[in-house]
Image (cartoon, grey):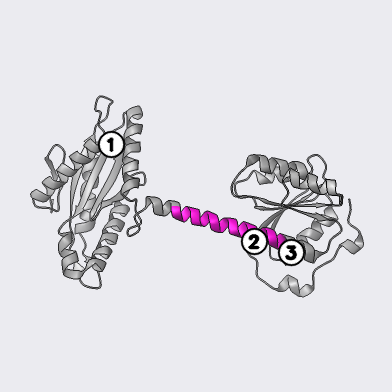
Amino acid sequence: MSPSHDFIDYPPADAQDSAPPSSKRVLVAEDDPIFRRVLLRWLHSWQYVVESAEDGQSAWNMLQKNDSPALVILDWMMPGMDGTEVCRRIRSQNAAPYRYVLLLTARDTKDDLVAGFEAGADDYLTKPFHAEELHARIRVGQRILDLQQALLNAQQALRFEAKHDRLTNICNRGAIIDCLVGELQRRRRSKEPLGLIMVDIDHFKVVNDTHGHLIGDKVLCEVARRLSQVVRTYDRIGRYGGEEFLVVVPGCDASGLAKLADRLRLAISSEPIDTEAASMAITISLGLAYVPLGQEFVTNCEDLLRRADEALYAAKRNGRNRVEASPLRHIAQAGE
């Protein structure tokens, strides 16, 4: 149905130059070219970023893209796939984030209203209508989508906090252990080698006793940052507890594991850590446990942790600032 001339209710001229463009995005599906231009002009003047489609099938194709708009304005009567069918397909996907759908139509009976909502529309606007009414209904949809985004952000933050250490922002104890368990399970299928590095900050109690726990926290954060910069993108690093860290190293041979561990050691010892209290020379000790290539070597998480812990204590006993491996074999010494 083509719009009548008195339907084309343009917004005031000053509204077109008010606010700068925002990140609001709308998909408009309307087969009437004159009405589509009117809608686009209104939406642009309200600072929406608009994508348009000439029919329902085109709109549906555009909605399959990952970055398609969440706010959708659909004309009911379109050739081929009409607006209600697009609604049904949107709702059948049950996808997140939610899409807010506003149906536009000349149909105004109660049965039509019910049919539109049952198809999955969130709101319904009967032609002809004024620009202000459309704008008000779009703002309702925008508020709902903004609330949804706030909830999604909160959920994402909670998921992050559940798996990350609040102080250092690396994996917490539970997450790094889960990662180790997962890599061991994957290794049983792939037979690939797997390495574990246990890291402990040398004389960390002296730092806390001398300068206080706030300075100690800053040292912890800087050590975590430096370690994170050295590991490979597919390695995982986590805070195991206190001043101890774990690094899970999949697909690495024994020589490569030892070299990585010594790079971690040098990343801490080669440059002092500056804090408000002092510039401190910090070192770390590292213990390695290794699962070699092949299915014949079977181990579990507890055994691998125990072996890495024994190697770490050997590094402590043998002078600190060094790497030891399980079985207790000297790999790299300070200054080498």
Residue nearest the observer in this picture, 135 or 335: 135
Residue nearest the observer in this picture, 24 or 157: 157
In what element is the residue under mark 1?
Answer: strand
Q: Residue 277: x, y in percent? A: 22, 73
Q: Which residues are magenta?
A: 138-158
Q: Residue 329: x, y in percent? A: 12, 40
Residue nearest the observer in this picture, 91 or 275: 91
Residue 119 belongs to magenta span: no
| Residue at 31% over, 58% down | 225
Q: Which numbered disc flags the more N-terminal residue, 3 or 1?
A: 3
In the image, taking residue 47 as reference, residue 237 lies left or right, namely: left
Residue nearest the observer in this picture, 43 or 128: 128
Q: Which mark is residue 143?
A: 2
Q: Which mark is residue 136?
A: 3
* Distance Cα–Cα, label 1 vs label 2: 49 Å
Q: Residues within 10 Å of mark 3 (few under 14, many from 20)?
A: few
In the image, taking residue 42 as reference, residue 313 lies left or right, namely: left
